[in-house]
Amino acid sequence: MKARLYERYVKEVVPVLKEKRKYTNVHAVPRMEKIVVNMGVSASLEKSAVDDAAKDLALITGRKAAISKSRHNIANFKLREGLPIGCRVTLRRDAMYEFFDRLIATALPRIRDFRGLSPRSFDGRGNYSLGVGDQTIFPEIELDKIKRQQGMDITIVTSARTNEEAFDLLKLMGMPFAEAKQTEAKRAKATEIEQKEGKAE
């Protein structure tokens, strides 16, 4: 059984993008290719910090995390070559869509005072990155079992050639960009005003 968001992409997103951007070939329509989730850990923390981060990342993504190691010796940062400094997971296909679904539907709305994601965090090549300051926004993490707050970077790699194409793709997939949320709020406010004016008449 295919992931829910993959079905949405095929049935709803592709037709809209083909119409808007006038793609003549379905293979030219931008798609999500992979999501990379990376947790960096300070070299000043105890050795078990990377292992704890890897366990949390595995719970969040459903995949075993690969340990990242330092490639250089940097005395000022207490780094030496080969020192574990973080972990990462690369998600593709159904695992990617399932993670993205949980990210936008469950995790991001749990951020305090969340007002939407910046539409300016694209890299110029159709990829989008966001930083999350706390792993506990993911319901898979049990608050009473975490040893330290751990942030992460999430990069969504797409086949889009431009930022604009990638923005259209991710917005249609449900990415809660700030501009879109502000537009919805303005529309709701206008509707509320119209209803009040109607009742007054």
Image (cartoon, rainbow, N blue to C red):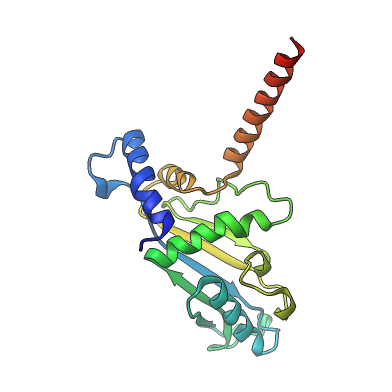
Q: x and y percent of residue 35 in the render?
A: 46, 64
Figure disc tally? 0
Q: Is residue 11 left or right of residue 153?
A: left
In the image, 154 versus 60, the foreground residue is 60
Q: x and y percent of residue 48 in the render?
A: 65, 89
Please give the name of the residue rendered at 69% of the width and 50% of the height, measured from the top-left corner: 114
Reply above or below: 25 against 69.
above
Reply above or below: 112 against 187.
below
Quadrant where the N terminus sits is bottom left
In the image, 120 versus 30, the foreground residue is 30
Please give the name of the residue rendered at 61% of the width and 79% of the height, measured from the top-left corner: 53
In the image, 55 versus 129, the foreground residue is 55
Q: Residue reaching furthest top?
A: 201
**Occupied quadrant, residue 41:** bottom right
Please give the name of the residue rendered at 55% of the width and 51% of the height, measured from the top-left corner: 121
Please give the name of the residue rendered at 43% of the width and 54% of the height, measured from the top-left corner: 5
In the image, 131 versus 61, the foreground residue is 61
Q: x and y percent of residue 58 in the render?
A: 54, 77
**Occupied quadrant, residue 81:** bottom right
Quadrant where the C terminus sits is top right
Q: Residue reaching furthest left?
A: 25
Q: x and y percent of residue 147 in the render?
A: 72, 81
Q: Is residue 163 left or right of residue 73?
A: left
Q: Is residue 26 left or right of residue 149?
A: left
